[in-house]
Image (spheres, coloured by chain):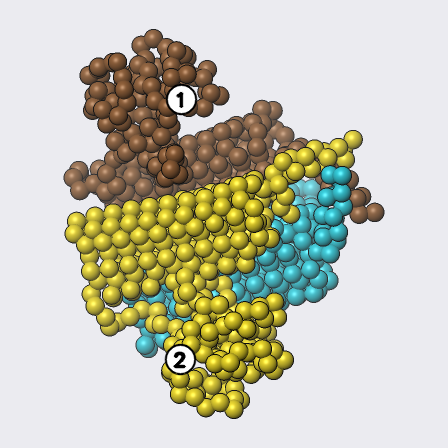
Chain colours: A brown, B yellow, C cyan
């Protein structure tokens, strides 16, 4: 679609007429010249100035910050317009056209399995009954998918992975704008999930696809049961998440972060390499210093938390 | 079944002989003259006085409060008797008789899907592989059911809904009485789940059916992954539950309540419209005043919680 | 495989040559003379002295404690060697040989169900669509398995059980050693799950199989939705776990323990009979005295927790 068609669809007034071909939406940081981005939260103004987006949905107030070579699409509600626009780029939920899936040598597809169009499964895999492998999914070699796993379209899983039963890879991230009347408008989650090699995921775990780009699970990651990973999280190599951990959107765990049972993050933050979060720890801010141990909610160093519990216990005396 | 047959089945001594036709069980508040209710917890005595139930299982001690036009069924263990009685009214888990399902125009039913007897699915829906749509389920138009979703019998889902993979709608509420010997007797959950229009449910979420009547999810509600909603909860329009929230039984969320990640409620309480519960907040009492922000466990106003954390931090000095 | 072959496989230097037939791995406590055990953590040294294992993977430092009749297999990394060894004894994920399953009288197997080799299902059961019953699974009489449940190989379920949709029984416990280079080596979970009679499990719950021996769910247990039970937990008769409870590995709940919503345990501990853990309680140590009520994290007696909350509230004044 051209930028002009895009503008017309969203009912935006614009002095520009443009036949630039628009291929999708993206963040200010990652957008290319054929993509459209948005800015509503002033916190991200610094990203606007450096964006390579072809056009940006932006309020009148911030429009003067839009860089040259980027077209300002002025609207009082950039985020809401983004939500409406996201539908334009949403692929089909199920493809009926496309190539039959490619299944590698020595791979077993058990009964009651669905494998979608254009999907590729490597060698020596086992895809067990009730698994759903959507369209355009790529799975490496020697990977084992247990029963009733769902892999949404466009996701990729590496070699030597084990995905336990009932786990969902690629469900939509929890994203929506709202109208003045309080109606929620879905932000279609047009990204995917990319899982590295030698990853094991427990049962009944949920990993959401990205709004844009990818939710990423690095090599060697181990994730336990009933873990919630929201959209656009990045887990670098060797991270360990134990049972019932919850990661909010856009959490980045650097290498070898360990999170104890029921611990969680608030999202839009990073955790330094080799950090340990104790069970129930609640991370609300970026942790920059590596190799430390944290606990509690609000979060503090684990040794401080232990000391604090001692002080709190004294209140009883 | 007649009231007399009911009395005989439960081995209750009664002076009444009655051929009133009994159609089911219900709460004191909602029971009609063809239904039987119960009272064990004195806390609900005020509801007994106003009940329209045809008969009530009640202890000798409280029997004098049973209103006229309502028959007292006296037993030392009303709740246990209710549990035994609930089995009498439990429908078949799977129907073998009944009409073939009605599938609307332009609706896609993918392979490996089961749709039960007497179920009706609207137009332009997609029911993806591995979904189980039980008997007498009603689904509106334009609704998308992702793979491996289970919808139990008698539940209804509105128009324009999206239900992500692995989610379960209508599993039994967690209800049982116990005998003196410590055996748990199941209270058959004979109600259902009713989901409004424009609702999106994340993946691997569980919504239990009501013991009596309905667990209700209002229009426009958004629910994230791995959320637990117990029996007889009511979520009014526009509520938002983020990842891993847990609602205990008979929680009522009024319009536009927002609950942060891993927050929870203790059940049998109400939360006023436009309330926000911060992540990890634990609600143990009704919140009557609308539009406030709460946090912590025990719960307090969010600004108080922040202040408290400051005071607690001072203990370390 | 002979002990000698085992030693060769793991590249262990050993003065012993032995053609003892090795049948598997086990803990120091439970190993028999045809099994191999391991000791890395000095905390368990007392178990070494009493072991009946045929051989033990052990460090040089602790080798002198290995009892007579037990062969010391000396290695600087006993736990890592155990991990490598566990793969030797892992059964096939899916059997292609074996007897066709035995299905009892009056049992209904709905469409889209898989039942594996050598499995036995009793009378009057209903196995609903999308359920996966793996190889060598034994299910008693009158048991109801809802849709999209997965039961992994070698697990057993008793009579009169109800397993709600999406629940997973027997997924791998979360176990791995790591190499010096930080690569995680899976400890194959060669045990199973054994579920007693009259057990009800909610929807989307996960129960992991044991590393060795069995994860055990006793008779009459009631488990709610989205509960996580790690490997080698033992729940004795009559325990109740409400929504989103999490049990870490090797937790033993004695009879009639009740755990409130989102409560959890740290693993490798026991909870005395008739204990109640309030919602959100976090159990980090063994509770020896029965019939008490506990709350909080760190855990304390419930009445103390209430008092403490009062004291904490005073900090605001």
Figure check: A55 above or below C234: above
Q: How many marks?
A: 2
Is C297 left or right of A50, judged from the image as shown? Answer: right
Task: Give the residue displayed 34% in from the left and 60% down from the top.
Answer: B155
Q: Is residue A84 visible?
A: yes
Chain identifier of the residue bearing label 1 in the image: A
Figure check: C179 above or below C189: above
Q: Are marks 2 and 1 on the same chain?
A: no
Q: Residues within 10 Å of mark 2 (few under 14, many from 20)?
A: many
Q: Which mark is residue A39?
A: 1
Query: Where is residue B208 shown, x and y percent of the image?
Result: 43, 59
Q: Quadrant of the N terminus of chain A?
A: top left
Q: Which residue is at the front of the view, C202 or C143?
A: C202
Chain identifier of the residue bearing label 2 in the image: B
Task: Give the residue displayed 48% in from the left and 50% down from the top.
Answer: B253
Q: Which residue is at the front of the view, B243 or A164?
A: B243
Query: Where is residue C62 shown, x and y percent of the image?
Result: 69, 45
Task: Give the residue displayed 51% in from the left and 59% down from the top.
Answer: B249
Q: Which residue is at the front of the view, B11 or C77?
A: B11
SS class, disc 1? strand
Is C73 left or right of A159, judged from the image as shown? Answer: right
SS class, disc 2? loop
Query: Where is residue C101 shown, x and y percent of the image?
Result: 32, 68
**Mark 2 lies on residue:** B22
Is A96 left or right of C131, judged from the image as shown? Answer: left
């Amino acid at each position: 679609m051209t930028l002009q068609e895009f503008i017309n669809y969203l009912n935006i007034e614009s002095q520009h007429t443009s036949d630039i071909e628009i291929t999708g939406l993206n963040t200010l940081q990652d957008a290319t010249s054929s993509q459209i981005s948005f800015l509503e939260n002033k916190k991200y103004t610094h990203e606007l100035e450096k964006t390579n987006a072809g056009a940006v949905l932006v309020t009148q107030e911030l429009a003067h910050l839009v860089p040259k070579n980027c077209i300002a699409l002025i609207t009082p509600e950039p985020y809401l317009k983004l939500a409406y626009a996201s539908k334009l780029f949403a692929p089909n939920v199920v493809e009926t056209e496309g190539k039959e899936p490619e299944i590698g040598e020595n791979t077993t597809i058990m009964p009651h399995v669905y494998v979608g169009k254009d999907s590729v499964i490597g060698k020596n895999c086992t895809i067990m009954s009730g698994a759903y492998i959507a369209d355009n999914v790529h799975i490496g070699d020697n990977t084992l998918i247990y029963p009733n796993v769902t892999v949404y379209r466009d996701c990729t899983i590496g070699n030597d992975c084990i995905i336990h039963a009932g786990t969902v890879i690629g469900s939509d991230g929890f994203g929506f704008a709202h109208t003045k009347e309080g109606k929620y408008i879905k932000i279609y989650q047009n990204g995917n999930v990319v899982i590295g090699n030698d990853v094991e995921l427990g049962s009944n775990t949920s990993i959401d696809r990205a709004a844009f780009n990818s939710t990423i699970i690095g090599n060697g990651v181990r994730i336990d049961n009933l873990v919630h990973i929201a959209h656009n999280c990045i887990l670098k190599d060797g991270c360990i998440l134990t049972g019932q951990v919850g990661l909010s959107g856009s959490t980045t765990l650097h290498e070898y972060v360990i999170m104890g049972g029921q611990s969680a993050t608030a999202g839009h933050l990073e955790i330094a390499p080799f950090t340990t979060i104790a069970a129930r720890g609640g991370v609300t801010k970026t942790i920059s210093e590596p190799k430390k141990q944290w606990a509690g909610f609000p979060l503090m160093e684990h040794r401080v938390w232990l000391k604090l519990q001692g002080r709190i216990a004294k209140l009883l005396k």
